Image (tube, rainbow, N blue to C red):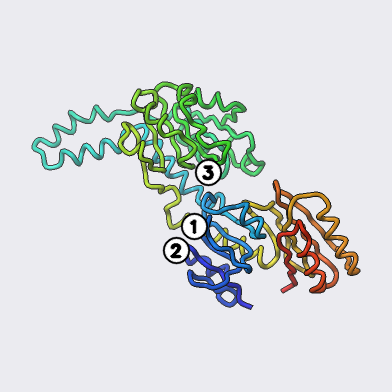
Amino acid sequence: MTVHVQTLNAISPVYHGILRESEYQVGPNVPDPEAILVRSADMHDFPIGEKLLCIGRAGAGVNNIPLDRMAEAGIVVFNSPGANANAVKEMVVAGLLLASRRIAEGVAWCKSIAGEPDLEAKVEKGKKQFAGPELAGKTLGVVGLGAIGVLVANMGIALGMDVLGYDPFISVDHAWKLSRSVRHSIELSEVIEKSDYLTLHVPLMDSTRGMIDSTVLDRMKPGAALLNFARGGLVDTCAVRDALASGKLRAYVTDFPSAELMDAPNAVVTPHLGASTPESEDNCVRMVARQIDDYLRNGSIVNACNYPNCPLGPCAMPRLTVLHKNVPNVIGSITQQLSAEGLNIENMVNQSRGAFAYTVADVSVRPSDELIRRLRGLDAIYRVRLLTPQ
């Protein structure tokens, strides 16, 4: 049986090594897909087909996908955190240099005097206006120590900077990868007040939207630089424009253009280039393709955005997977139905995330179609799948 996967954007063909043509049909015009591969296409008004089981976002941000709506339809949304981390880290390196050495202004000035007489003399006379400090010995504040933030913090150490990191929710895996030379601050205020360069690496959520506002900018060092290669909405751009005009901020380097910043003094704006490398795009597609394949084949959920992570081994016996509301008595209802049919549960796992939960049961004998129908009829159930060994 061929699995249909629809692409909503131009997707790197590296997925062929995972979603093999003998099992998967992948393309933009594939009808009734069981899975979707997407990059930036807006899915908020996207019609949901009855067969759709999962969505793979080839990138980290999922602002273009209505997560709760998909969860309530029994559709798992995956992303690819960390797949573009190195690409973004390299942009941050460029951003630090652009904020320090006034490179962009110097390049523009050189072009403006092209063809003028006594060019070399003018260059020697004019270069003083673009002088800027070195990075070594300065304090770099890194807000958010996820996949990208850890690489940026370690890069700052390699550049000879004093690095302050802040992340109250840092994972064990990321903590292990962090250089011991990075000072982990427990107060965001300390990072804000002590940094010569402040770089943001947190997701855009209600709690982080506009987190860098006029109050925060007032507490930063006079002449500090702000870098934002995470999400534009983290920063109050009007407040940043005012801070640049007053000289409170020496520079703002961002990958997210906005009308308020396009002509602001000392604002360096790039057209969302952070993950725009062929390596990054390939890495993102490979990651979500593996996640889609593992979910469809084994029911395993890794790097989900709207359901709990639930990594599973290969499907070695009949496996029931149930996406449901995270409310009392659902698990009891599932086990009651299995028991009524005389099925023995060999292995069972339940994970929850906010309003949504996932229950998986490996059973000794294949459940009947009638049992599947009864489970699907329960009020709290969004999706029931029966997987069998392949």
What is the distance, in whole Å, between disc 1 and disc 3 at their CAs?
Answer: 19 Å
Q: Which residue is the site of mark 1?
A: 39
In the displayed structure, does residue 155 sit left or right of residue 310? left
Quadrant assignment for the C terminus: bottom right
Q: Residue at x 90, y 64 (%)?
A: 339
- Residue 43 in percent (x, y) is at 52, 57
Q: Which residue is the site of mark 2?
A: 10
Q: Residues within 10 Å of mark 1 (few under 14, many from 20)?
A: many
Query: In the rendered structure, which disc, 3 or 2, sits on the residue that comes first in sequence?
Result: 2
Q: Check disc 3 and report its element: helix, strand or loop.
A: helix
Query: In the rendered structure, which disc, 1 or 2, sits on the residue that comes first in sequence?
Result: 2
Residue 148 disc label: 3
In the displayed structure, does residue 297 sit left or right of residue 232? right
What is the distance, in whole Å, between disc 1 and disc 2 at their CAs?
Answer: 8 Å
Q: How crowded is mark 2: few (under 14 residues within 10 Å), some or many (20 or more)?
A: few
- Residue 257 in percent (x, y) is at 38, 42
Residue type at numbered disc 2: Ala
- Residue 37 in percent (x, y) is at 53, 62
